[in-house]
Amino acid sequence: MNLFRRLKFSGFWGWIVAAFLLVVTVFNFQQKQVNSTPSRSLSNTQNQAIVNPENPSNSAQNSQIETIAKSNSCTQQSPFDESVRFALRGSNLAQTAKTKQQWDEVARNWVQAVAWMQAVPPNSPKRAFAEKKVVEYMRNLAYSQQQAAKTQMTSQFPSFDSEFLDQQLQLYLSYLSTVGKPDILIVGSSRAVQGIDPREMKVALAAKGYQGLKIFNFGVNGATAQVVNYILREVLTPDQLPKMIVWADGVRALNSGRIDRTYQSIMASEGHKRLASGVRPKLAQNQSEQTKICYQMPKSCMAQPKWNFPKASQENQQLETEIAVEPLELESESETFDFVQFEQSETPQLNNLLYRSSEPITATPVSLGTTIDANGFLPQSNRFNPNTYYQQRPYVSGQYDGDYRAFNLGGEQARALSFLVGFVKTRNIPLVFVNLPLTDDYLDSFRWWAEQQFRNHMQRLSKEYGFLFIDLSEQALTRYEYFVDPSHLNRYGARVVAQKLVGQSAIPWPRAK
């Protein structure tokens, strides 16, 4: 009553203040109701979902309820228990996973399991045990990712009878859709796909003032001049071509005396027939990129960070720079991860999942160095040692090497090179041919003679046709530690080659838009 009398005599501003206080009071009361109701009314349903996550009748409802409850309230949760819940679900799903989508779901659950187990506080009595479980769960995650990658994506386009070409083409189309057209495209055979690291080239170019360039390695095992010409002129469309092409290879690519089995297989493939009929390869686009599944990562209830995500309009090359990390390097050359395979038996119980080691679980060692990265590069970590290499493989001299068979730098490979040079000229795309290094162990007298003939031939053609020839067969790049075998570079050699190329002042590097 006293408040009413004061407002009556306080005039206009007094009533404004009173109205504001009333609105604030009502708003706070409604917020308390919203925050408290879901966590109380849905707690029983949440517990049901944890006990039986595989119940198909209420899985969607459980997911929605759980997401709403967690987003509207900050509840104290046990990271260890949350991790176990996701691990159990991932293990259960792995028993029946067959499609790429199913293995993706398995992997997502293991990601959650790893994140929650890593969130066990450092001073917790469970921490030491949790650290061991993180390692185990990461192996399970790696295995599920491997299975998802192995499972073929739905494709409307038939194979080119070259598994490597099929995979690289699919990856390149995905790269175009995600990152955009590359500024520099590396092409060639297996020597190219292992011999130039796009990420290292990007870093080296940025240091010289060429920031923000996008680089992709489209190397294909067995690719000759005919195959490279076919990919660039026939498979890719003009709007899928880069600003510059770096063709990295050697004698094999232009020796018409050898049988070009890779090109012959492609020409006889269903993929080529479909392409010749006017149908072009493209990725499936019938699925929405917006997922309806929400996940909750562990975070502190004391401090809610405000994340500033980059807008979609920002350059997609952040995917290659800010998020890029140094590839995982194993402690020894022969060390591999054991990707855990789940036994196709009964659904694992919680105690089995937590307290038993992986003795009964079969494990398949898979080298991390045999995986193509997002930029098409195939990193190899092993180092060539002739003392051990030839204990497992016979030595083949140049006279009996199929790559140097009936050595001939004319013929169909020379014609393919001529066609390709004319093609890129009409589109103002600079072409740089890089002669990759070889070990002295590989270069016996016959190969040395053939390589010398090749260098002289390419230097003459580069002046005649108007492309750039870079010879990296220098002594400094032939160290065994840069090679995985006598003629193929490892990731350390690929790094040095990328840096050497960037140091070539004659190369007209493009500028990012």
Image (cartoon, rainbow, N blue to C red):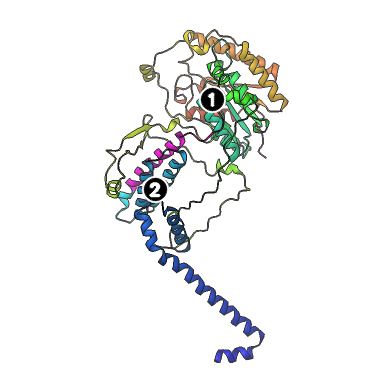
Question: Which residue is rendered at x = 55% and y = 46% of the image?
Answer: 289
State left or right for residue 212 relative to residue 396: right
The amino acid type of the residue labelled 2 equals: Val
Q: Nearer the viewer, residue 385 or 408?
A: 408
Q: Is residue 328 visible?
A: no
Residue identifier under label 2: 114
Give percent across and percent down for residue 88. Answer: 35, 48
The amino acid type of the residue labelled 1 equals: Val
103 part of magenta stretch: no
151 part of magenta stretch: yes
Residue span colored magenta: 131-156
Image height of 444 relative to 180, above or below: above
Q: Nearer the viewer, residue 329 or 273?
A: 273
Q: Nearer the viewer, residue 504 or 491?
A: 491
Q: Is residue 181 visible?
A: yes
Image height of 247 relative to 154, above or below: above
Residue identifier under label 1: 220
